[in-house]
Image: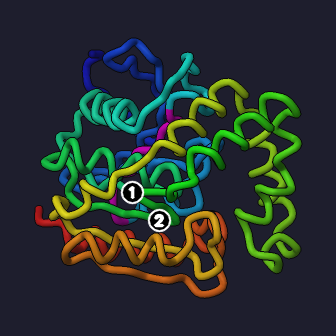
């Protein structure tokens, strides 16, 4: 592993245990501050978290990164697994010198965070599960495979209309066209093979058995109108994780860190306050 570094909001790169190179941004503004690592959603990159990260920085050091297959990180051939993504995050934390942190993720990133907490519980000070699920359902492999096939045969552009309506509420899309377009542009820059491999990972996800073993402070947040990972999925995680909190965000859809960053940041700041330091 590369030696630990502590830049101030500086991009860096780490080579994971299997040689995959990940790009990250670390914002360190002092000593002995809370630490928060944020994991982005499918087909996004670390910039996804910037609206929330800006609100967190007065309260904590913040680490964001491009997951393998995404953004500026390497895009090795699949298959991908959540166990592999959890190992990537563990290697990144070690690289930046963090023994542990509050781990939070949205959508795919939330399931990565779950997998990390299940495997690296002692390194997970608290857990933020946003617009996410432990299991997409019995028909998930088929549905995610269909999405991957569409991308491979018709291109990612074929999925843009589908994605926009899942990501954001109707009024938000109308009132925030630049933000929506930025998300679309990020989506379209994805490598199709890596996107398909990640879809396969999501379709195979089932972390339900790990939930009762999670004992760190946990916040579950979900948009009221989220039909990608709907409220009942959040309620199921909340019921299975003892002591967790559940917040249903009124009027929001699937990408709440972009749609209502203040609400998500407030939830994470409250979670920071529950970490024993």
Q: Residue visible at 72% across and 42% down?
A: 146
Q: Which residue is mark 2?
A: 130
- Residue 14 place in picture, x, y as percent: 40, 22
Q: Residue visible at 59% across and 82% down?
A: 224
Q: Which residue is mark 1?
A: 104
Crowding near pointer 1: few (<14 within 10 Å), some, many (20+)?
many
Residue lying at the far top of the rendered structure: 19
- Residue 29 place in picture, x, y as percent: 35, 50
Check disc 2 and report its element: helix, strand or loop. Answer: strand
The reply to whether residue 6 is visible in this rendering is no
Left or right, 45 with reference to 185: left
Q: Quadrant of residue 187?
A: top right
Contact between labelled residues 1 and 2, with CB atoms less than 8 Å apart: yes
Residue lying at the far bottom of the rendered structure: 250
Left or right, 34 with reference to 206: left
Of the 4 image quadrants, the one containing the N terminus is: top left
Q: Is residue 64 within the magenta segment?
A: yes
- Residue 156 place in picture, x, y as percent: 81, 38
Left or right, 42 with reference to 1: right
**Which numbered disc flags the more N-terminal residue, 2 or 1?**
1
In three-dimensional space, the C-alpha distance between marks 2 and 1, rounded to whole angstroms, equals: 7 Å
Region rendered in magenta: 59-67
């Amino acid at each position: 592993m590369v030696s630990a570094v502590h830049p101030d909001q500086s991009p860096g790169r780490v080579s994971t245990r299997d040689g995959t190179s990940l790009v990250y941004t670390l914002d360190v503004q002092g000593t002995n501050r809370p630490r928060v690592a944020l994991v982005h959603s499918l087909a996004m990159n670390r910039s996804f978290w910037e609206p929330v990260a800006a609100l967190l920085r007065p309260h904590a050091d913040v680490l964001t990164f491009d997951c393998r297959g995404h953004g500026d990180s390497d895009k090795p051939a699949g298959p991908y697994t959540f166990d592999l993504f959890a190992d990537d995050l563990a290697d990144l934390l070690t690289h930046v010198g963090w023994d542990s942190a509050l781990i939070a993720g949205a959508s795919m990133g939330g399931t990565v965070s779950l997998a990390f907490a299940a495997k690296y519980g002692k390194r997970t000070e608290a857990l933020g599960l946003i617009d996410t699920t432990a299991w997409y359902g019995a028909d998930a492999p088929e549905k995610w495979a269909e999405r991957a096939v569409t991308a491979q045969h018709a291109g990612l552009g074929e999925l843009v209309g589908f994605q926009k309506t899942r990501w954001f509420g109707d009024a938000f899309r109308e009132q925030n066209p630049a933000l929506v377009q930025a998300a679309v542009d990020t989506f379209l820059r994805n490598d199709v093979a890596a996107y398909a491999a990640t879809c396969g990972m999501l379709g195979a996800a089932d972390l339900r058995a790990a939930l009762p073993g999670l004992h760190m402070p946990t916040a579950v947040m979900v948009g009221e109108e989220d039909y990608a990972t709907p409220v009942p999925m959040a309620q199921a995680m909340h019921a299975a994780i003892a002591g967790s909190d559940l917040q249903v965000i009124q009027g929001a859809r699937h990408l709440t860190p972009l749609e209502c960053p203040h609400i998500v940041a407030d939830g994470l700041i409250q979670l920071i306050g529950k970490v024993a330091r």
